[in-house]
Image (cartoon, rainbow, N blue to C red):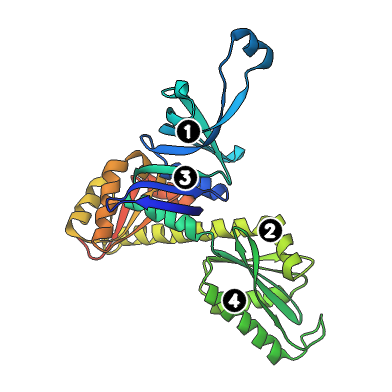
Amino acid sequence: MNVQNRNLDEARRGGITLVPENLDDLWHLKYLVEPGDTVSTVTSRRVEGPDDLQRSTGGERETMEVDLEVEDVEFHRFSNRLRVAGVIRGCGRETEIGEHHTVNVEVHDELTVSKQWAPDQLERLREAEEARESEVVVVTVEEGEGHLHSVESHGVEERGSFSYQGAKGEHGDSGAREEMFREMAEAVERLSPDGVVVAGPGFTKQDLHEVLMEHVDVERVSLEDTASVGGRGVHEALKRGAVESVAEEARVSRESRLVDELMERVSDDGAAVYGVEPVEQAVEYGAVERLLVVDEFLRTNRDDVGDLVERVEQKGGDVTVFSGEFEPGMRLESLGGIAALLRYRID
């Protein structure tokens, strides 16, 4: 997410101007834009005219800036757009004020969202903005050389090149080969990605994969066959969807690990609770180490659950918002949509 401007007061009320840069950003907006918010953007609207002219031309569309009071928000994943419907409260045509209108927000559209921002929404926005940085790196390797690239919203950036003396197709100096692998692993570790794609021709990538799995703390490392290394190899991996796949797997892995820990604590030492009332009690005691909540449950229970999120953060706890589209979020949904890992057991 490209956040271009923030204009908030001390109470977190005001407008934030942003530009979604990919499909994930539109998905985030589904949970940032709510009924009652004001969305200001450029849109097109059919111009009313005489009935006979309407019939012959179908009506012309005019581009205008609008301030829309939001009534409904829908995310259409397969059409790559966010549908925001509401009432026009401001625009260049006075006759349009008070009329209903729908804005289709697509990737690279600029909009300003004005509202009373909740802490969890600002945190989600921060995560979406940071996702512009490297969450996934692509390592391409063949005998004698290796390359490290990070995948950014604006494109692919080279982060390092590595080599050792030895003919391609041969291990050559095994000590130099292992040293190159270690250097590449250290470079990956410094970037702290969520996922790594190891790509290249032949079997060298399998050896590097083993080194990365041993030395790098990362959620997901995947292998991809490519005919080339360097920039061309990264392009091949991108075309095949390898980067999107490993990023999604990394998120699911994190969320799955938290749900597994929740279930283990519930059945073992009891330092966990689930359901609204038990979580409320744990928050009151200041016992919540990490609050787990499904995004859709949070959206539909904004007032009550949003207050719990804010209180947890005020008392030094962490909050993880799960995607209800993936298996860990579905498991959490079956437990009531909200749970908490506790600092200590409460009776």
Judging depth in this view, the residue of 166 and 65 nearest the camera is 65
Which numbered disc covers residue 66?
A: 1
Judging depth in this view, the residue of 119 and 254 nearest the camera is 119
Q: Give the secondary structure at mark 3.
A: helix
- The residue beneath circle 4 is 212
Residue at image location 35% in from the left, 35% down from the top: 36
Report crowding for label 2: few under 14, some 14 to 19, many 20 or more residues within 10 A (C-alpha): some
Decide: is 11 above or below 45: below
Report crowding for label 1: few under 14, some 14 to 19, many 20 or more residues within 10 A (C-alpha): many
Which numbered disc covers residue 238?
A: 2
Camera-near label (1 vs 4) is 1
Decide: is 261 above or below 16: below
In space, the residues marked 1 and 4 are separated at their CA atoms by 51 Å
Picture coordinates of residue 211, whole percent (x, y): 61, 79
- The residue beneath circle 3 is 29
Tag 3: residue type? Leu
Camera-near label (3 vs 4) is 3
